[in-house]
């Protein structure tokens, strides 16, 4: 199976898994909203709000997978693969927005606690744990190397942990009548959302700002290119980045001896250089310019 077919198969599998998780989340979210208002539970309402962002995250992830599958065009020469990274960034931003809203409401409930239906909170939270763990298990079978899938997974995972905090709050309310436990559980959910948001925004920002792939040292890459063949004299204008979360790419100018260019050795050398990048750094997309030493005099801004 070719890499292109493998990618299409993986994207199709991811889309199917995301649809299953989306159905689980939407169905339970509607039930939770109704119970949250009946029980006057901010924790349940916070969880429902988080589940709404979960549903939006899953829908956005599906949309991004569809865009990423489109072929390249003269306008979009790499296709729309980075739609997946934008989706992950949007997921991070929505987590921040919801956490801010819930924080304000939780502080108000801490100052002025209201009556909270403990049994209803506990019952819905326990069901929520089951639903979210099931959705988490479904998404865990997808391609976690994809930041798009990982963003959706983090949304669901933090919601599952949030339901556990809510269930604990329900137990406390039933046993002690301490209504502020509901607001405290909400703040626990906020902390989980903030942690997940930071990870998504940091990683998506790193990719969108063309940072080098994690774990790839450009000094090591340069040395590996130099070590491939004694005809290689220097390497400059070396750049490495991620097209999308699991597709690294690089470009470099490789200075070779004049004899290498005149005796027809360049085709073999180029193959060896690209094989070295593929074998050592998993770099399938490498663009290498072979040039004479004197060519640098004609370049502006090389480094």
Image (cartoon, rainbow, N blue to C red):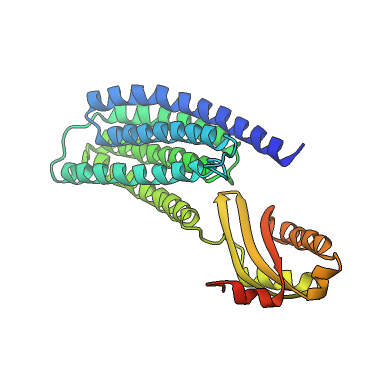
Instruction: Name the residue furthest right.
Output: 263
Question: Measuring 30% from the left and 26% from the top, which residue is drawn there?
Answer: 33
Work out whether residue 172 or residue 242 is closer to the camera in this orientation and state it: 242
Q: Quadrant of the N terminus?
A: top right
Residue 160 percent coordinates (x, y): 43, 38
Left or right of 5? Residue 17 is left
Question: Measuring 83% from the left and 69% from the top, which residue is drawn there?
Answer: 262
Asked if residue 133 can be seen in this view, the reply is no
Asked if residue 285 can be seen in this view, the reply is yes
Residue 60 percent coordinates (x, y): 44, 34
Say above or below: 68 vs 265: above
Q: Quadrant of the C terminus?
A: bottom right
Occupied quadrant, residue 220: bottom right
Question: Measuring 58% from the left and 64% from the top, which residue is drawn there?
Answer: 239
Say above or below: 209 vs 8: below
Work out whether residue 138 or residue 93 is closer to the camera in this orientation and state it: 93
């Amino acid at each position: 199976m070719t890499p292109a077919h493998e990618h299409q198969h993986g994207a199709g599998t991811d889309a199917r898994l995301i649809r299953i998780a989306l159905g689980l989340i939407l169905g339970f979210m509607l039930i939770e909203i109704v119970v949250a208002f009946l029980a006057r539970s901010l924790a349940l309402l916070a969880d429902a709000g988080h589940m709404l962002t979960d549903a939006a995250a899953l829908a956005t992830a599906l949309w991004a997978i569809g865009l990423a599958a489109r072929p390249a065009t003269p306008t979009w020469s790499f296709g729309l693969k980075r739609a997946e990274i934008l989706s992950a960034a949007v997921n991070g931003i929505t987590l921040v927005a919801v956490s801010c809203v819930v924080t304000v409401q939780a502080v108000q409930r801490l100052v002025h606690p209201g009556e909270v239906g403990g049994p209803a909170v506990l019952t819905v939270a326990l069901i929520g744990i089951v639903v979210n763990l099931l959705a988490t298990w479904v998404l865990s079978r997808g391609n976690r190397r994809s930041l798009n899938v990982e963003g959706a997974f983090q949304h669901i995972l933090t919601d599952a942990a949030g339901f556990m905090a809510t269930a604990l709050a329900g137990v406390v309310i039933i046993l002690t009548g301490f209504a502020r436990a509901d607001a405290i559980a909400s703040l626990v959910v906020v902390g989980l959302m903030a942690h997940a948001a930071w990870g998504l925004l940091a990683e998506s920002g790193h990719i969108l700002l063309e940072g080098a792939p994690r774990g790839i040292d450009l000094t090591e890459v340069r040395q590996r290119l130099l070590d491939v063949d004694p005809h290689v004299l220097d390497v400059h204008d070396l750049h490495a980045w991620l097209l999308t979360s699991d597709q690294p790419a690089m470009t470099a100018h490789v200075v070779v001896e004049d004899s290498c260019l005149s005796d027809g050795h360049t085709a073999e050398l180029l193959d060896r250089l690209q094989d070295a990048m593929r074998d050592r750094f998993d770099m399938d997309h490498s663009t290498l310019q072979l040039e004479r030493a004197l060519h640098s005099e004609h370049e502006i801004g090389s480094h």
